[in-house]
Image (cartoon, grey):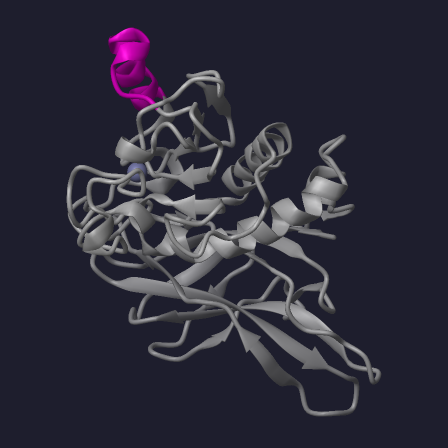
Amino acid sequence: MKSYQGVCLHTMVGSLAGTDSMFQKDGTVGTESHFGVGEHGEIYQWVDTKYTADANYLGSGHVISIETADYGGSFGRWNTRGDNVPYWNAKQIAAIVKIIVWACKTHDIPIRMMANSRDRGIGYHAMGVPGNELPSKYKGTRYQWSKYAGKVCPGRKRISQVPGIVKLAQTGSTTPATSSEGILGMSKYSGGKHYAGQQKLTYNKWEHVHLNSQGDVSILTCNGHPFMAQTGITVEGLKPGESIQFRYIISSYKKGTKTKITDRYPKQEFVGTSGGTYMAPTQIGGKGKGGGGRSNRLRLLVWTNSRTAKITSIHPKSMKG
Ligand SMILES: [Zn+2]
């Protein structure tokens, strides 16, 4: 490497196994990135960070690259034309944070969000792509990260997760992971309860996802602490082409007063397939403050344009700093 400007996130449009065999094909002279993260959070390293990998075109001598799986398995088969890359799941986020913390510590890179491909810190591929985020005056310089114009890698959904990942890495850098409970400096892990009851969904209306037969809706009390939440959900009756959306919200709760929504996270959309559809909307964050006897609770809303969809199982998991 000529320098260590930062760490760049990519998406594979494929699985870890498929990308691995492609990268291995020509030894280290072909195409490869430094790291790869699989669907279940597996970490591969293809190239020692002393040496250049070539995922970032003219920036490859300055940027450590991480490729991430996005296709098949729990990601399903999605239309790879356009900007449809699904969100990173919680295990991938934990693995990416681990690599970032290690790389930044080892190579003295600041753990912060890059403003653009000329900045130092953590960035993503599209920042250095002509016709996307790279101004044309930087074409042909080390800040051009792709030969091809218009590349959206790692996709708008994953790009929306990058600031949260950087925040987690900042926490993790001071409290390194020592065990699965202590990962990212998040000490409180809640496996949640698996609930196999049924919740019939209302057509075209946002409503709370129920976590048990009592109708409880709060996943965790966050009060401004960093958190990571993933909710495994099985939906039946969602026909191909119909969609379902989820969004995590923060509700300010105090017994005897009106509950207010204080923050809304971005919507996450899933499309129906034949048979039951399994999805796992994931969120990292740290909004809300609590205080004044109020507590800020993370909840999950659901919306669908299906008249037949119902949730048949739900399994919330969360971690808190
Ligand atoms: Zn890329």
As for residue 207 lying within the magenta part, the answer is: no
Picture quadrant of residue 132: bottom left
Q: Is residue 297 above or below residue 72?
A: below
User: Which residue is depicted at the point 54% across and 44% down?
Assistant: 90
Q: Nearer the viewer, residue 235 or 55?
A: 55
Q: Nearer the viewer, residue 172 or 250?
A: 172
User: Which residue is depicted at the point 27% across and 36% down?
Assistant: 13
Give the x, y percent position of residue 51: 43, 17
Picture quadrant of residue 61: top left
Magenta segment range? 17-32
Most extreme residue toward the bottom is 257
Dominant secondary-structure state across the stretch colored magenta: helix
As for residue 26 lying within the magenta part, the answer is: yes
Report the number of discs. 0
Most extreme residue toward the right is 293
Q: From the viewer's perspective, tell me whether residue 282 is left or right of residue 201.
A: right
Give the x, y percent position of residue 149: 15, 46
Q: Is residue 53 above or below residue 295?
A: above
Which quadrant of the picture is home to ligand 1?
A: top left
Q: Is residue 4 above or below residue 189?
A: above
The quarter of the rendered structure image containing the N terminus is top left
Q: From the viewer's perspective, tell me whether residue 152 is left or right of residue 277.
A: left
Give the x, y percent position of residue 256: 78, 91
User: Which residue is depicted at the point 32% across and 21% down?
Assistant: 32
